[in-house]
Image (cartoon, helix red, strand yellow):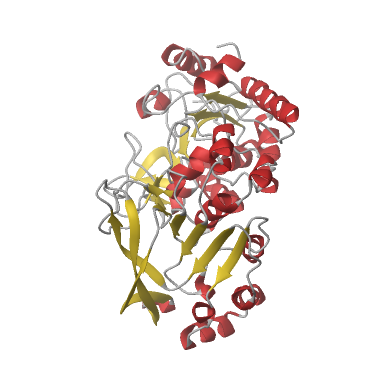
Amino acid sequence: MPQLGTAEHPLRVAVIGSGPAAFYVAEHLLGREHPVAQVDMFERLPAPYGLVRFGVAPDHAKIKNVTRVYDKIARRPGFRFFGNVDFGTHLTLEDLRQHYHQICFATGAQTDRRMNIPGEDLQRSHTATEFVAWYNGHPDYRDREFDLSVERVAVVGIGNIAVDVARILCRTPDELQRTDIADYALEALARSRVKEVYVLGRRGPAQAAFTNAEVKELGELDGADFVVLPEETALDPLSREAVAQSGEASLERKVELLQGFAAAQRAGKPKTLTLRFLVSPVELTGDDAGRVVGMKLVRNELYLGDGGSLRPRATEHTEELPVEMVFRSVGYRGVPLPGVPFDDRWGVVPNERGRVAAPDGEPLVGVYVSGWIKRGPSGVIGTNKPCAAETVETMVADVAKAAVLSPGQPDPAAAEALVRDRQPRPVTFVDWCRIDALELERGKAAGRPRVKLTSVDEMLAAVGQ
């Protein structure tokens, strides 16, 4: 058998997904002298970049500039992109095994965790991710409807996504007009009657996941006062000790910033964004039509849990919050992939340094994971780069010991023929560049960064399909 990983016999790798984790896997593979690799990337939608396109808030344009890095990766020799090709619909794991030596899944964490409280399924109770996908122009969510005629909204959770949702709800039409938010969302938010937005965190200010820059941003909204309650920013003894022992100047600064906002006077702007700490929803209440009209909150206190982390527990103190719409952002989890082992408890694919583990604990030869489907929903975009590097090191080690698949048809032309047989309308990276250019042209005409195409048919029509 000829040596695998040479120019004559390159390592053939399929990467499922096209977000940051997927592109960093491609980068680490294609950047090596040995083994020589070829990467075929498969994406269900015509557009690549995953959460960078459909998850990053439209008013955070600088973060989206990371796609320039991915563009360079996509132009490297040995890379191919097959958009509009769905694993599980057009291709199976067995199909891929016939054409690739290794298969890496980088499909993210696609669903939200539930709060598991009464009333969670009332009308006007939503997941934060569906709202984010809607305003970012995700084809699966463009037709969702959100009742923005309400005046009071609660966002449960205090991570980046929760803060994004609250901020977008509070932005003025002029602020949103300067972003690449989907046209239909721009129009709907311009008509919004929302006046009060509450962001609810179950722990205290010292445990908040958002960054100092995000805190400052909430205090700089053109049309909304940023309110923090003084009594909720006062640190309890355990939090004071934790901050002191952390030695992190940024954490100390975060607490100072929040306490400063708590002491500030309101400017009388049209909307109010209130950040709450140490509260948890225990019930959503509804009207006769089954719509959310209120939320029952319980006050929490912190205690030292296993492992030394501060955990919240409920007290006897409760309050009623009169809100008419709720977005939950309390964690995310991956979804099972056909034919691939899955840990339902943790919402990830079981693995050891990226190498997928079969139910009996043995390695599943030639199958790997990277990103959130590997480690769970943690970190930022850049966290996926070392995560991908670890997975690729595992893949390369397996090549060295010949622990790879033995595809019957490793020729790139055979894989492409299969794809086009199963999906006659695949989108290449050249096609995507044409879609991208059209969106930028539409944006220039409208005085905006870009105007997105938000349906699969629109994207395919743009490339003559």
Identify whether 260 is placed above or below 210.
Answer: below
- Is any part of residue 10 visible from this angle? yes
Of residues 153 and 397, the one nearer the viewer is 153
Quadrant in the rendering for residue 7 = top right
Residue 452 % position (x, y)? 61, 30
Of residues 106 and 319, the one nearer the viewer is 319
Quadrant in the rendering for residue 32 = top right
Identify whether 294 is placed above or below 249.
Answer: above
Q: Residue at x 41, y 56 (%)?
A: 331
Residue 96 % position (x, y)? 42, 26
Q: Is residue 94 left or right of residue 420?
A: left
- Is any part of residue 354 visible from this angle? no
Q: Residue at x 54, y 79 (%)?
A: 230
Of residues 264 and 95, the one nearer the viewer is 264
User: Which quadrant holds the C terminus?
Assistant: top right
Quick one: which residue is furthest to the bottom in this view? 237
Q: Is residue 173 left or right of residue 148?
A: right
